[in-house]
Amino acid sequence: MNLDGWTHKFTIGGIDCYLKIGTVGFSEWFDYPHLSIGEICYLDLTISNRIEEMRAYEVLMELANVAIKNGSRVEDVAAVLRGHKFEPAGVTSNENIPMAASICDYIGRYLESKTKKEGTKNGTDKTN
């Protein structure tokens, strides 16, 4: 199996966040035609007094990662993450997603944008 990927840095409500996207390649042994994003990992490197809140995001992203690794469609995982409202929220550093209701909302919308990008194969365009 060929693994590749990229790291996407974004800011939401003044918090710097990193999203690691791993992609699944195709080989004669493994073929995931519905899935090219093979894993996601959320990291918050901002020193914060809201450690419990940030840990909750890490747990949620780990659950999303397990779902993707076990065959859930990225589009379905993105749909579950989108629309949830809680802090941190607000203005983001991504001009394509200028406002987000939460980190979950941002990540869902970002994943959705990568799976729907024109001219790419199932969202494997590595541009940030």
Image (spheres, rainbow, N blue to C red):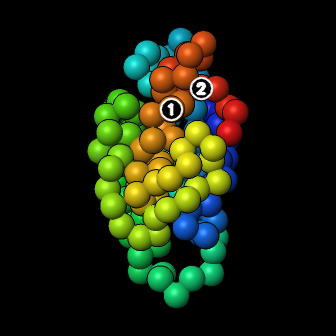
**Which residue in the rendered view is the most extreme toward the bottom?**
49
Q: Is residue 100 left or right of residue 7?
A: left
Q: Residue 109: give x, y in percent of width and height.
A: 45, 41
Q: Residue flagged by tag 2: what amino acid is it? A: Thr
Q: Residue flagged by tag 1: what amino acid is it? A: Ser
Q: Residue 50: give x, y in percent of width and height.
A: 47, 83
Q: Quadrant of residue 126?
A: top right
State the residue at coordinates (58%, 56%): 92
Give whichever of discs 1 and 2 has the lower sequence position: 1
State the residue at coordinates (52%, 87%): 49
Q: Residue 102: give x, y in percent of width and height.
A: 42, 60
Between circles 1 and 2, the one closer to the viewer is: 1
Q: Quadrant of residue 80?
A: top left
**Callout 1 crowding tier (Cα within 10 Å): few <14, some 14–19, many ≥20:** some
Q: Residue 124: give x, y in percent of width and height.
A: 59, 26
Q: Secondary structure at mark 2?
A: loop
- Pick whichever, 68 or 121, lies toward us: 121
Q: State the separation of the CA atoms marked 1 and 2.
A: 11 Å
**Callout 2 crowding tier (Cα within 10 Å): few <14, some 14–19, many ≥20:** many
Q: Is residue 71 left or right of residue 2?
A: left
**Residue 36 shows in this picture:** no
Look at the picture and state if 110 lies above or below 83: above
Look at the picture and state if 75 lies above or below 52: above
Q: Secondary structure at mark 1?
A: helix
**Residue 118 shows in this picture:** yes
* Tag 2 residue: 124
State the residue at coordinates (56%, 16%): 118
Look at the picture and state if 15 lies above or below 101: below
* Tag 1 residue: 113
- Pick whichever, 67 or 120, lies toward us: 120
- Pick whichever, 78 or 24, lies toward us: 78
